[in-house]
Amino acid sequence: MRIMKLPGNINKRNTLIAAVISCFALIFASISLVNHYNFRTYAWDLGINNNAIYDYAHFRWNDCMLMQPQFENVLSDHLSLYPLLVSPFYWIFGSYTMLIFQIVAILVGGFGIYRYFLKKTADYNLSMIAMIHFLSVWGIYSALAFDYHDNVISAMLVPWLFLAFENKKQGLSFLLLFLICIGKENMALWAVFIALTLYLLNYKSPVYSRRALLMSVLALFYFVLAIKVIIPAIGNEGREYLHLKYKVLGNTFGEVIHTIIFRPQYVFSLLFENHTGWEGADFIKSELHFFVLLSGGFALFYKSQFILMILPIYAQKLFNDDFGKWGINDQYSIELVPVLTLALFTFLYEWNTKRKFLIYLLPCLITIAATASSLDHRQSKWYNPERLQFYKKSHYQTPYNVNEVRNVLSAIPANAAVSATNSLVPHLAFRDYIYQFPVVGNAEFIVILKLGNPYPLNEEELNKKLSELSQSDAWIKITENNDIIVFRRK
């Protein structure tokens, strides 16, 4: 069978690149932006980020009411600085700002893959297919279906770091490393292993191997500084870093490290076993491994340098107390995307010495098929297909009238303190005081979407709260229709 190769003319190549990126941009927007329009984004985490960029755009630190009393400053939860950098765009894009930033970052990351492989191999066919593979991996789609998250941006900078290192641009390499680190404190720990991978790939060069080691040391320094100094300093008094949720390994960083060093067989078994004891969490880890292999993970056995990059991600996922982080849902697999593409196409280039187009194309098609399958069927718990199945009518429909809900929200004063149910919060977060119902605080208005996601309440608890509010002497119902209810404090 004759396989059609990609066009050789430069203008045709650029046109094809633009067409591919535009196609994926449309798909990504149809997932993320449609979810937000249809009230399928939530207080945690888009609401938190929207409230943060509102405060930053007004030149003040964020004391997010959505996170109190657990966190008095949003940065004491995660040291994520991207919202600070992006906040001026709030004036232009409103509540869609962080979602648009995330989509653009993913597309830029895909183009970074193309540029990296083009520089490294001068093979346009490989470079183009590598970009398509990158933009097709399930980790991207899962992340887009659930709000905005800073680790997505950090992961999208990895191809550009590899490119800068390949181009021997020292200053740019250190800048990109820093930008990866400031995405979130655990991204700094990941950056340690990214730099070590660059060391292994360049160990024959004394200059660049030393530079990679220096990058690794600097990333480790930033990580320790973040969790031991900065986060405790800006957090609630007497409270240290709260995301060490690995009781299966230990209760402190010291205990975790001791277990990893002295009980390696036990630690290895945790990569596959359900350590919660709940049967409902069976096979979630197996599902992750299966999709990693289908998406190019087999190349890690041949390009073992890249295993270093995957180890900390596997550790933070599979050793976690929360089985929701084990599988392929949400943003918890996004860091695997650049690793899989880098390892796969580095291996294919070295192995496919005759440069057969089909050798590049076949693994990409398998990955696309795996991703398509993951959109319909998952072992991972709490999967909501309506948020992700952009090709189905149900993704664009809601049980409530979106326009009517928006009209009600627009009538709420912009400077009023508000308590709102989960899926309304991101749309009402641009104010000084925003709470997630049933927390009320000093709210002047309570806004409840009847058929939206009422987390942390269930439907029965929400109805009970509604009954209490209706009978309360402190609140008066000012709006009610089939979709939404608004109470105002008397």
Image (cartoon, rainbow, N blue to C red):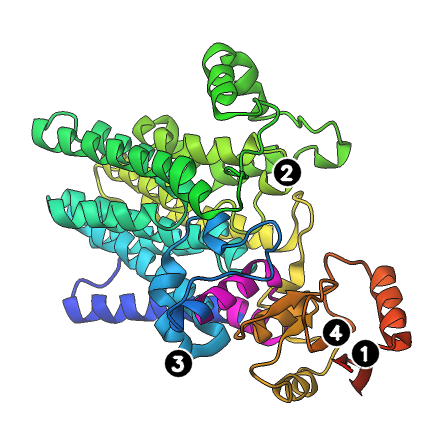
Residue type at the position of mark 1: Trp
Cα–Cα gap, marks 2 and 4:
29 Å
Foreground mark, 4 or 1, reads 1
Residue underneath mark 2: 322
Residue type at the position of mark 3: Ile
Residue appearing at x 40%, y 79% in the figure = 91
Q: Nearer the N terminus, badge 2 or badge 4?
A: 2
Q: Are marks 1 and 3 in contact (CB under 8 Å)?
A: no
Answer left or right for 11 relative to 396.
left
Crowding near the residue tagged with mark 4, few <14, some 14–19, many ≥20 C-alpha atoms within 10 Å:
many
In the structure shown, which secondary structural element does the residue marked by tag 3 occupy?
Answer: helix
In the structure shown, which secondary structural element does the residue marked by tag 2 occupy?
Answer: loop
Q: Nearer the N terminus, badge 2 or badge 3?
A: 3
Residue underneath mark 3: 92
Answer left or right for 5 relative to 372.
left
Q: Is residue 121 visible?
A: no
In the structure shown, which secondary structural element does the residue marked by tag 1 occupy?
Answer: strand
Residue 412 position, x and y percent, is 64, 85
Q: Nearer the N terminus, badge 4 or badge 1?
A: 4
